[in-house]
């Protein structure tokens, strides 16, 4: 089964390109803040994550996804495990298969892989190293953002995702080539790989192979395609950061379209806080009138309500202050 969507219109005039942030330069903090305000999305270069590590993990992911379906489905589980076509539990469907894993600091060895990979040890090690390395980059990005916003101390945001029991997730996605796309009868329709949504967490850090498909929604409602760049990472602001910045940063709506010829493989680290963490606008970002745009909630409350929603729902709406 596939979900179709209308052909995409070209980006509106005035759109230049996706912001590129060199996180090795402290002065990039200003562009970083602007990117979070204007798009809720940016590309990171000079990120410090080893390309060799990324290649090993990508190779292991491809090996896993090329196992027979009967083997992969042995790892089916909820909320973590293998999934195919169904996204979440509320009827969303996409042209995608995936592995969802706990990425907490203390998640330990993932039992999921024993016997499921040709080289479980290599897969497990690559996952552990990747999580550690991408978490470090995530912390660097959050500290640069804090600095750029003029907030002290520097770890105000990063401490939320760096303590022992953060609720972070690692997702490996595989979008196989979709034969429907090249059919003359299809009328130029697109096939949805992963339907439009915002991420509930603080920030998400994505890396993909050389197959494009990711699109972001601009504030004027138009969709723009993000050219793939396997040597860079793409970061998006999540709902929780939108709330903490009192709406100054935008949690970007994004989606993935399937490709007719090539398969797309992506790995995404969703940096979430601990379950008991209170999410509320930071006092220093509330304007002089003291106007808070959101009511406070805990990450556990938000996560529970998110998992009851459909992908495209506006999950923050119920927490907006009237
Ligand atoms: C979107 C971001 C992450 O991929 C994810 C997704 C989760 C899932 O795939 O199970 C959700 C989706 C995501 C938000 C709403 C709910 C839950 C699917 C869905 C319909 C792992 C997450 O944390 O939230």
Image (cartoon, rainbow, N blue to C red):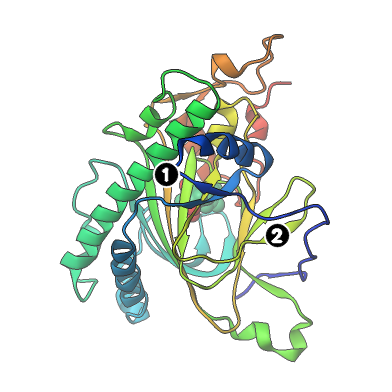
Residue 134's spot in the image, x, y percent? 35, 49
- How many numbered discs? 2
Residue 228's spot in the image, x, y percent? 55, 66
Q: Reading the chain from its start, which is encountered first: label 2 or label 1? A: 1
Asked whether the beta carbons under mark 2 and mark 1 sit within 8 Å of each other, the answer is no
| Image position of 164 (left or right of 184) | left
In the rendered image, the vertical position of residue 165 relative to residue 282, given as above or below: below
Label 2: which secondary element: strand
Q: Give the class, few, some or many, for how many residues have Cα within 10 Å of label 2's Cα (few <14, many ≥20).
A: many
On the question of residue 130 being in view, the answer is yes
> Label 2 vs label 1: CA separation?
27 Å
Residue at left 37%, top 39%?
167
Question: 10 or 93: which is nearer to us?
Answer: 10
Which residue is disc 2 drawn over? Answer: 224
| Image position of 144 (left or right of 312) | left
Residue at left 50%, top 20%?
151
Residue at left 30%, top 42%?
104
Label 1: which secondary element: loop
Numbered badge on residue 24: 1
Residue at left 33%, top 68%?
55
Quarter of the image with the N terminus is: bottom right
Question: 53 or 295: which is nearer to us?
Answer: 53
């Amino acid at each position: 089964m596939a979900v179709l969507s209308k052909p995409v219109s070209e980006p509106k005039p005035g759109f230049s390109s996706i912001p590129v942030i060199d996180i090795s330069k402290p002065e990039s903090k200003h562009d970083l803040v602007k990117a979070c305000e204007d798009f809720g999305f940016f590309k990171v270069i000079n990120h410090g994550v080893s390309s060799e590590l990324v290649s090993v993990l990508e190779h292991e992911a491809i090996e896993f996804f090329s196992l027979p379906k009967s083997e992969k489905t042995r790892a089916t589980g909820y909320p973590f495990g293998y999934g195919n076509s169904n996204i979440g539990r509320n009827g969303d469907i996409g042209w995608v298969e995936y592995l969802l894993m706990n990425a907490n600091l203390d998640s330990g060895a993932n039992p999921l892989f024993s016997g499921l990979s040709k080289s479980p040890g290599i897969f497990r090690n690559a996952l552990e190293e990747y999580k550690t390395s991408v978490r470090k980059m995530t912390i660097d990005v959050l500290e640069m953002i804090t600095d750029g916003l003029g907030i002290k101390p520097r770890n105000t945001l990063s401490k939320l995702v760096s303590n022992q029991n953060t609720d972070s997730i690692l997702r490996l996605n595989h979008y196989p080539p979709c034969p429907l796309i090249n059919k003359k009868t299809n009328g130029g329709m697109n096939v949805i790989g992963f339907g439009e949504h915002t991420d509930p967490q603080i920030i998400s850090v994505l890396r993909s192979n050389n197959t494009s498909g990711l699109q972001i929604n601009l504030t004027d409602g138009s969709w723009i395609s993000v050219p793939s760049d396997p040597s860079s990472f793409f970061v998006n602001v999540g709902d929780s950061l939108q709330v903490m910045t009192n709406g100054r940063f935008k949690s970007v709506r994004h989606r993935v379209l399937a490709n007719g010829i090539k398969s797309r493989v992506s790995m995404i680290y969703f940096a979430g806080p601990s379950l008991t963490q209170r999410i509320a606008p930071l006092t220093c970002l509330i304007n002089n009138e003291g106007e808070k745009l959101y009511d406070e909630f805990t990450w556990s409350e938000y996560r529970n309500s998110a998992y009851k929603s459909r992908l495209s729902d506006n999950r923050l709406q119920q927490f907006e202050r009237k």
